[in-house]
Amino acid sequence: MSGVHDTPAWVMLAYLVAGICFILALRGLSSPATSQRGNRLGMIGMAIAVVTTLVTHVPSAIQPGGHPLQYSPVFAPDWTTIALILAAIGIGAVIGIIGARRIQMTAMPQLVAAFHSLVGLAAVLVGAAAFLNPEAFGIVTRITPIAEPSFLMINPVSRIELGLGVAIGAITFSGSVIAFLKLNGNMGGAPILLPGRHVINLGTLVAILGLVAYFTQDQAPWVFWTILALSFAIGFLLIIPIGGADMPVVVSMLNSYSGWAAAAMGFTLHNSAMIITGALVGSSGAILSYIMCRAMNRSFISVIAGGFGAVASSGSGEVIDRPYKRGSAEDAAFLMKQSDQVIIVPGYGMAVAQAQHVLREMADLLKKEGVRVKYAIHPVAGRMPGHMNVLLAEANVPYDEVFELEDINSEFAQTDVAFVIGANDVTNPAAKTDKTSPIYGMPVLDVEKARTVLFIKRSMGGAGYAGVDNELFYRDNTMMLLADAKKMVEEIVKALA
């Protein structure tokens, strides 16, 4: 294995600095107050890693007999190759800048899923290139007398890295494509249940692992491409049965997969920065998936095996025709103006209506009237982890007014008004009382304990993303405000002013 033991000390030091930047970036991203600093550190670390890799890995014009992954002691690059690399970086940068400027916050989960798919596809392409031309990647263990590419023997350890890398990458790609289609509305959020899906999925996974093991003994092309094809298939099969309410877990899970795929390719490329970065992303994504599952009182296996709504139940999403109280913006303004404390519970409906800015304006008016205002965030509110936190931060909501479920749930009983704007499943009391409900056991915000619940919903004709009607709508202390979220809040602001 060339290009490892002769690595210059400054290269390893640069990768170490990049790795420290990535760790500090993750630390910064754990809080909205430090998220911008975390992003900057991540960008600095990536810049260091990319520049170091380009300087040390580009083909050298004065290094006859060397391959592209060997470290060159003298930087005398092939400028044609450099130009092509810079052109590729430039094209990607233009696409990224345009996409970042045009993308709406409501579409951020879809964007994240799309990014994950690209990471997975990159791992697959790198793995395929390494398999087709192993000598260029420095993973050849011996060459037969007939020096044809088909006779280049790949290091058995590298075969494991290749097999696992392309498998995880392919699963990440195809799974992320399905997640994107579900989040973007191109595919229904309801689970698509195939007959015998558990047997099919388990059999496919066992076949992939068996072929990876066999690949260490036989590097025949059919083995590699079969691993790739089965991995693409299992990615689709795993995500299609998952219901919409489990999408936050799916997003964090795919994030973890993309990290492990990058780490596996880092071993193939002999690149320490990729290994470190991939391991950090993979482990942090796995931890986040665990946190999301705990927030829903579900196991990771149960999410993968089915998802909310995957089992028929009485909570099938049919909206029951029951009496409810309907209020107006003036009613809501009067009730909140007379309150000591108002807790605002944002959900995906707020994101769709882009109501976060006018919501902050409403809160500012209430605070001028002497009302204490707090925001309650459920861990799985929205379509990805931290979705609501990002939207509120975008509207400059003070960080000290935003509380997680476990920190604020006990306060609802002493709260005058709970103002729910587009958050359905995470406020549904059926999660605590109805054992037949697909969301039973999921910790929810105890908004029903407030003296009055103001619930903004576009209409009474639809259930939540989990396909479950919310019995909170019909409680005596609930007043429904049926309208577009942004328009309703704007009317409330006018009434308060």
Image (tube, rainbow, N blue to C red):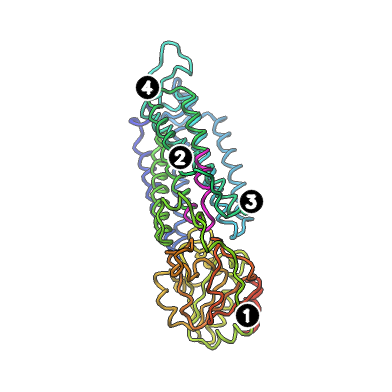
Q: Which mark is residue 168?
A: 2
What residue type is disc 3 on?
Asn
Point 46% across, 37% down: residue: 204
| Lower position in the chain sequence, tag 4 or tag 3 | 4
Q: Residues within 10 Å of mark 3 (few under 14, many from 20)?
A: few
Q: Which residue is mark 1?
A: 326
Q: Disc 4, disc 2: CB below 8 Å? A: no
Mark 2 → mark 3, Cα distance in angstroms: 25 Å
Mark 1 → mark 4, Cα distance in angstroms: 74 Å
Q: Residues within 10 Å of mark 4 (few under 14, many from 20)?
A: some
Q: Which mark is residue 186?
A: 3
The spot of residue 395 in percent (x, y) is 56, 69
Up-down relation of residue 264 to residue 451 (above or below)? above
Up-down relation of residue 443 to residue 171 (above or below)? below
Closer to us: mark 1 or mark 4? 1
Closer to us: mark 4 or mark 3? 3
What residue type is disc 4 on?
Thr
| Lower position in the chain sequence, tag 3 or tag 1 | 3
- The stretch of residues the image draws in magenta is 233-250
The spot of residue 69 in percent (x, y) is 44, 30
